[in-house]
Image (cartoon, grey):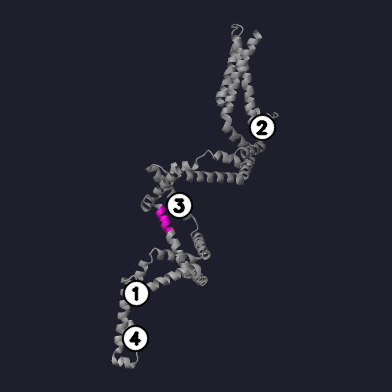
Amino acid sequence: MKLIATGLLVVMAAVFVAARAIEHAHPAASWVKAFAEAAMVGGLADWFAVTALFRHPLGLPIPHTAIIPRNKDRIGEALATFLKENFLIAPVVARRMRNIDLAGAAGRFLQAPAGQETRIRRGASRLIADLAESLDDERLGGLVKGAVSSRLKAMEVAPLLGHALASAINEDRHVPMLEAAIRWMARALEANEGLIRDMVHSKANWILKLAGIDSRIADAVVDGLRKLTVEMGTDPAHPVRLKVEQALADLANDLQHKPETRERVEAMKDELLANKSVGLWLDTLWQKGRAALIKAARNPDAAMAGKLGEILQSMGASLEHDPQMRRAINQFARRAVAGMAASYGSSIVKLVSETVRGWDARTVTARLEDAVGRDLQYIRINGTLVGGLVGLILHALDRL
């Protein structure tokens, strides 16, 4: 654009010289001469004006030239103030954000075609894997274990256990566990029958042993226990079974409402958390979870099998078609951005002004000239052409 503008000025100069040379033979050439003369004046004037913005014309220190390099600090402060007053204040940001449906756009993006959805899933998986691998494993593991332990210590588990047990009893979900316990008792009896007989034999005196009564007593004990386990397993209304269920109900009530029981449970919980074995178990659990997460994220197609894509599409559908959720998310985003503008607007403004102040004059000139220089060269071209037209008008007035 500089070449075009300068070339047009040179052409006007050549036309002026040619028209002046033939003016005495061709009086009509005076019109061309007037046009070219005024065009040169307009072009040179606008060249001076455009050049004076960025540097001294012809290197001469003419007053009020090189305006931008001499005033770069003031320009930076003015630009920063303009940004703050027109963009980075909370009311302006909130008003602009009010017309942006961020949740709807996110919903449409998440409900992507199959190929795009795959790219989204791969990108999300890669981000998760990179994040999990980049974090300090030992420190992060310590944070996770510390957070879990702190949360468990702060949580009173006795009422939760009592409520869970009471709900299970009310919905008969404890029955399979009770029956499993009865079956385990039966298997334990079969496996330890010899031990029971030895215990009876060792407790019997010599008279019972001499008469062989100890063996009959052992048989009676074993048969009685076997019969008890069979009857408890087949009869839901067995007295022993009812007593066990009543004991469970009492335990559920004590866990929720009895201070002594709750204190004992909390003491047991604290002892358990202080045990080194529990810490090792939490560490092993964290390592396995982290490794599984990284492995799944590194191979989303095989390990995640499209599950993440389905979740993303479901989230997108909810965002796009649920007005209440969309309104809530948009409101949250609007408040968050407005809050960021209120909290960090001054910092951003300071960053802009200090950045411009830190540039040298040549950098400022080059960047601004790259941004608007093309349009400024149009000013030179227009000045040349408009100057020529003004010259024609003045020449016409002079003739009249």
Q: Earlier in the sequence, mark 2 or mark 4?
A: 2
Q: Residue at x 43, y 59 (%)?
A: 289
Q: Which residue is mark 1?
A: 185
Q: Secondary structure at mark 2?
A: helix
Q: Earlier in the sequence, mark 1 or mark 4?
A: 1
The residue range painted magenta reads 290-297
Q: Quadrant of the C terminus?
A: top right
Q: CA distance from mark 3 to mark 2?
A: 51 Å
Q: Secondary structure at mark 4?
A: helix
Q: Which residue is mark 3?
A: 128
Q: Residue at x 29, y 92 (%)?
A: 211
Report whether residue 191 is seen: no
93 up-or-down from 258: above or below: above
Q: Which residue is mark 4?
A: 200
65 up-or-down from 40: above or below: below
Q: CA distance from mark 3 to mark 1?
A: 48 Å
Q: Residue at x 65, y 35 (%)?
A: 69
